[in-house]
Image (cartoon, grey):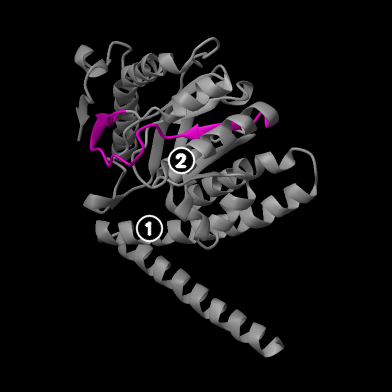
Amino acid sequence: MVAVLSAVSSAFSWFFVRYFGITIMFYLLSYVSPLAGFVARVLASVMALIACALYGVFASIVLRLSGGDRWQISQWATARAFKFTMALLTGLTFEVEDPNNYLGSTRPAVFVGNHQTEMDVLMLGCMFPQFCSVTAKRQLRSYPFLGWFMSLSGTIFIDRANSKDARSAMRGAADAIQSQRQSVYMFPEGTRSYAQEAMLLPFKKGAFHLAVQAGVPVVPVVVANYSHLYAPGKFRFLPGRIPIKVLKPIPTTGLTSDDVTVLTERVRDAMLQEIGSLTLKGRAQALAAATKGKPFTVPASAQPPASASKGVSTGVSL
């Protein structure tokens, strides 16, 4: 047994040292090649994700053993660890605008936000509230490290191939929200958009059915389009700050399933009204940082076109 553990430890050390060395090499090459910078930050991100998932497993175990409702902050604690690790290793982070502290004062709730790329994992790391969990497809449960952490920390898994199980999972989520005062974060677009401009895909109604069923408010979270900093299809991964704005909670008290369509449209329209100006703000900050000039403020009048509330794009693009 000792020999086996020694061999495993040696193999892990061998892998880690070489992985770390390759990552450093690509960081050095990034001074002459943007592609090398992309590879370096991708490698660093994978390292950060694995390390924080492992931390999350142990944190979830400790918090569950500590008793009470402490286990409900497992995802928050892990999210914060990922936020700081990614800021250190890649220089990319998200800045949250929440002057009324809706994230901290609205509990329980269904938080909804736009879904752009896999980098939204970092977005959650930067804004994720305490006593909140995410939903995920059932297949993720079997993933090493990440799946273990998600299972231990109370993630709600949904089998998208089985609508009956999905409905059961939603009922379970509503029960958890009501009995444990556990909030849930969901992406109503249902898939990553990989958009190059400020836009929203059509919303699915699951999150809004859940909010109505649980009788809790919907809190829209708008993330600026960040394709100028991260666009995997263009091999772009740059350091920078991406704005997030938390909007006023929308109550669901007294609503029924017949009101879900109107609620869905109301939330999407509210988010569309913010995403254009928020994206302009983010790109102004990036331009100021790149040119080392003084940052300028996007005027309040810089709103998306009136047609944006009915369409899918605000027209703000690279």
Q: Which of marks 1 and 2 is nearer the N terminus?
A: 1
Frontmost residue, 168 versus 34: 168
Regarding mark 1 in the picture, which secondary structure is present there?
helix
Asked whether residue 125 appears in the rendered view, the answer is no
Q: Check disc 1: other Cα within 10 Å, few if <14, some if 14-19, many if 20+.
A: some
The amino acid type, in three-letter code, at marker 2 is Lys
Cα separation, mark 1 vs mark 2, equals 37 Å
Let me know if residue 261 is in the magenta part: no
> Magenta residues?
180-202
Q: Classify residue 53 by image quadrant.
A: bottom right
User: Count of labels shown?
Assistant: 2
The amino acid type, in three-letter code, at marker 1 is Val
Residue for point 29% across, 62% down: 36
Frontmost residue, 240 versus 181: 181
* Residue 281 percent across, percent down from the top left: 33, 26
Q: Which residue is disc 1 drawn over?
A: 42
Q: Quadrant of the N terminus?
A: bottom right
* Residue 120 percent across, percent down from the top left: 42, 42
On screen, 239 above or below 23?
Answer: above
